[in-house]
Amino acid sequence: MSPTTGAFPADLLANTGSAFATLFATMPAAGMLVDASSQRVIQVNDAFTQLFGWQAQRIVGQPANNFPLWCGSDRWDNLLRKLDQNKTLRGVRHEVCSRNGSLQHCILNIEPISPGSSCLLITLQQERPSAPATTGIDERHLKIFNATGEALLLIDSDGYILEVNSKFERLTGLSNSDCVNKKLSAMQILDTETAARLLSQLKRRGRLDSEEIRVQIKPGSEPYDVLVHAKTVQLAGRTCLVVTARDITAQKLNEKALNESQERLNRALDASEMGVWDWQISSGELHCSPRSAELNGLAADHIEGNIRSFTQHVLPIDQRSLRRAYLSICRSQNRYHKLTYRVLNSDSKERWIEATATLHRNDAGKPVRLVGTLLDITVRRKSEKALVDSEAKFAALFQGAPDPYCLVHSQSRRIIEVNLSFTSTFGHTPQSIVGHTPDEAGVWSKAEMHAPLDDAIRGKRVLNGLIETFATYQGKLLICEVSTSNLSINRQPCVLFSFRDITARKQAEAALRASEDKFARAFKGSPDSISITEKISGKHLEVNDGFTRLTGYSAEEVIGKTAQELNIWAQASDRQTLIDELDRHGRVHHHEMTVNTRMGTQMQVAVSVQPLNIDGIDCILLTSRDVTEQKLIEAKVKHLAYHDALTNLPNRLLLSDRLSQLNALNNRHNMHGALLFFDLDHFKHINDSLGHSCGDAVLQEVTSRLLTLVRAEDTVARLGGDEFVVLLSGLEASGRQLEQEVECTARKLLNAISDPMQIDGHTLQLSASIGVALMPEHGSTPDDLLKRADIALYKVKELGRNGIAFFEQTMQVAASERLAIESELRGALKEKEFVLYYQPQINHLTRAIEGAEALIRWQHPHKGTVVPGAFMHVLEETGLILPVGEWVLLEACCFVSRLLQEGAIDANTFSLSINISPRQFRQSSFVSDVLQAIETYSIPPQCLKLEIIEGIVIQNVADTIDKMNFLRERGVHFAIDDFGTGYSSLSYLKKLPVDLLKIDQSFVRECTSNPNDAEIIRAIIAIASSLRMDLIAEGVETTEQLIFLHELGCDHYQGYLFSPPVDEHAFRLLLNSRQQT
């Protein structure tokens, strides 16, 4: 938009006067005029165009935030929000985007061109950092220069300071302005001698490397030490010097203090003749003083090395001790340790060394450093040894003592000698323990022992029979009585420790106390009845609370009396029976008996008896437990194991046992029997429609009726669900007469079941199917008889139910064939032998194919194409209908998807019908399976029509309606298949989201010749019309049938009149022919 279009005040700039216009156009700062009300650009000056590249004709008249000058329209809005009440904003740093995309850092000002004016003057001045202008350092390097952790100076070749960083300012207290453009020599930071020395080195080497100097910033201020580096660089064509300075004053003071401390330590160690050593465990490096090297048999200048070289002259046996000590130190929680070892010096003389060590660990607790001292104790050890040698006579007595003896030097606390008994008791050899303190040897087992034993070693107290726990060399703990005697040997104070191992005695005492305590607690606290009686007299000595709870007798009533006097035993001989079994077997366990209570009742108890001896008197400990309820439960459990919980009839297990017994009885007496296997027809409908409680009541009523009809010697059993078996025994007839007798009984059973029964306010009339197997004609084992009766029952169901069938061998063949078909069907599913055929659905009025029904076929490798009637019932019975039904659903959706992609069908007019089995529909995953199939092949839901039978609805109305509504809301259509052939219920039908009723072909077949079929079709059409449902007739094979249906108002059909079911290829040809027509 040009500035002359009138979108903003055209004379706004002119009203400001020619002087302002001239000044605005020629001012050096980039300028922009903006209308405050419309926020459009009025004008920009030449400086603006030169700085940012934006031409006036490109932006004048445009909204100020309509081009990327401000790096985002939100940033322009933020600027406007910052304006004060006078519409003024000054000195704001802001990034501005040039036309070429580069960013400019500017100082921004906004103000009205005159008070109250709506025209805002915006000026932008490029911000230029001063440092780069003088030093040649670009912005990136200047940031690094200021961010470094060292103090930095930049000096030109004439000695003038060009730049200092913030670290230099903090170090010296001088600001950047105090230093820049001043000559370094004039600032008198360095003394003349130091300045001359540094200048000489710079001229000679061109740099300074780690020069330590002292500087004083101001006269009278405290000087400090600085580490200086310097190097020449080229900046903007000039030779400059970069100087790095680090304050090392604190470091110098620490070094000085450390040196002074080390000097004092060395003087102290020299005076004490001690050596020091320091081992860095992680690196293996070891440093030592000359004295330490000398004490370990090394040259005085051997002050560095490793632990192996440091200990190379230690005796081999002590080297092993040192390694064990090191491992012990690492495992210990103590930091300080002391140990002794022997060294062979240069003249092959043995020297005793005492070492102290302090362990240091890192933050993770890992040992990293070991520091310590060495001291020559050879003279002291020789004195101790001489003391031992001077006591030979004492030693003989000492060694021969039967108790463990240990002689300890009071002052050094070291063990001088142990006797043989000590060695055998505690496991320490003299070589491993002599010369060590008891602590080092590990004799004291715990820290709290140290105080009394240390007092005894120092002679402060004498121990007499102190009981303590001591550790053997193997780590075993012994309880000992310890006594001490103070001795003087060669004028040296010593202490003789004597030990007596009382571990076994203490353990026996503890075990006895524990046993008595355990027995007392178990006796008193046991929930069982426990009594102690004299074996011979039978008098009660003690009873617990459990005895009182069981019998009702208190302790006061029974103690001193016998069970016979109290009449506790139901049989007088019961107690003697227990005594006899106790004498034979040494104990009695879980002997079941009957006892009398104080209240006069009887109960079953399980009795256990153990012998006791109390103060030389033979007694018995008798424990009794009430098992009355347990026996009742066991009897109930045993009954339930063989009987049905609902009807109390024998179950399969008990029936099998009775079949085996009956078979043996028939063989012995040449008699016959019969097994009647029957179930109730359509019993599942009762459970589904009236509930399981009603179904249970029906089963109980059937049980009652069966029991009234059979003889006492016959058996009625329930195998589960609605399956019953009646076992007839003792039949003397044979052949045809036997069959007639059994059939007569079976007929009575059927008639009894079919009589109406009143259940929960419902009048029900049932029927049953019975399969019969004769004994022994049809089998001799329970499994064979049940299986063959079941085969006969299956035959009855095939013939329409509500009947009786005797097993025949041909039925076995049919059952085997059915089993073979099942096996082949499983293989067919695995080998993908199933295919779908499609029968077109025709609109008679338009002759168009508006849909099709998907029908499964089995491409058998030997039998060819097999129709569903030959195998569908097996799929239903075996449950294979579920995976097959899922395959049909996916395959049908896939076919629809391909037809849509090929343009062969119209999604708005064509739908494919799929038959859904009741079992498939009842699956909890049915809805998600359908939606997943639709989503997988991306087909419109209205292209899918699910055909269900009326039986699905009746079985669970609420669940059926919920599932259908859910899918219907998502576009899936439903049809009722074979309408009128099942238990049609108009009350259910009107609630269902059904789009289509399908007239079954059984009515269509004779509709032109059978008035009944014609009337049924008229009724179905009327129902569909009243419920506003579509109609289609299946099985239309003649023109007469089609005309009849058309006259009644049914114009959609499928059948052989148009086409039989065909494969995919043939169906495509049919579609193409119709499109061409």
Image (cartoon, rainbow, N blue to C red):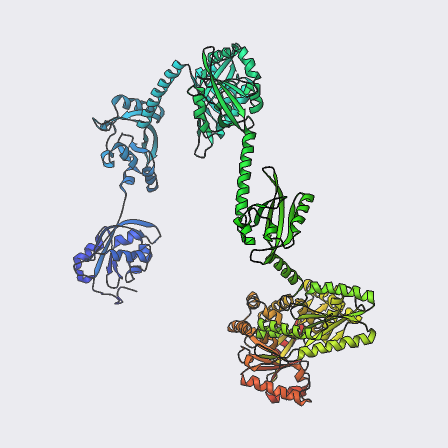
Where's the N terminus, which quadrant?
bottom left
Question: For this view, does 190 lie left or right of residue 368?
Answer: left
Q: Which residue occupies 76% across, 67% down?
A: 785
Q: Relative to residue 1046, is residue 439 drawn left or right?
A: left
* Residue 1077 shows up from this direction: no
- Locate residue 878: give its quadrant: bottom right
Q: Which quarter of the figure has residue 745?
A: bottom right
In the rendered structure, the answer to whether residue 796 lies left or right of residue 684 reads right
Q: On screen, 536 above or below 719? A: above
Q: Nearer the viewer, residue 838 or 314?
A: 314
> Going 24% across and 63% down the picture, which residue do you hit?
37
Where residue 194 sits: x, y (%)?
Answer: 28, 22
Q: Would residue 10 be found to the left or right of residue 494 on screen?
A: left
Query: Considering only vertical position in the picture, is 505 above or below 429?
Result: below
Quadrant into which the C terminus falls: bottom right
**Is residue 518 something that shows in the picture?**
yes
Residue closest to the eye, 138 or 922: 922
Position of residue 777 measured from the top left corner of the image (x, y, whole percent): 81, 69
Numbered marks: total: 0
- Could you say which is closer to the camera, residue 79 or residue 963? 963
Q: Quadrant of residue 117?
A: bottom left
Q: Residue 991's x, y, as percent?
A: 53, 78
Residue 1013 drawn at (x, y percent):
66, 87
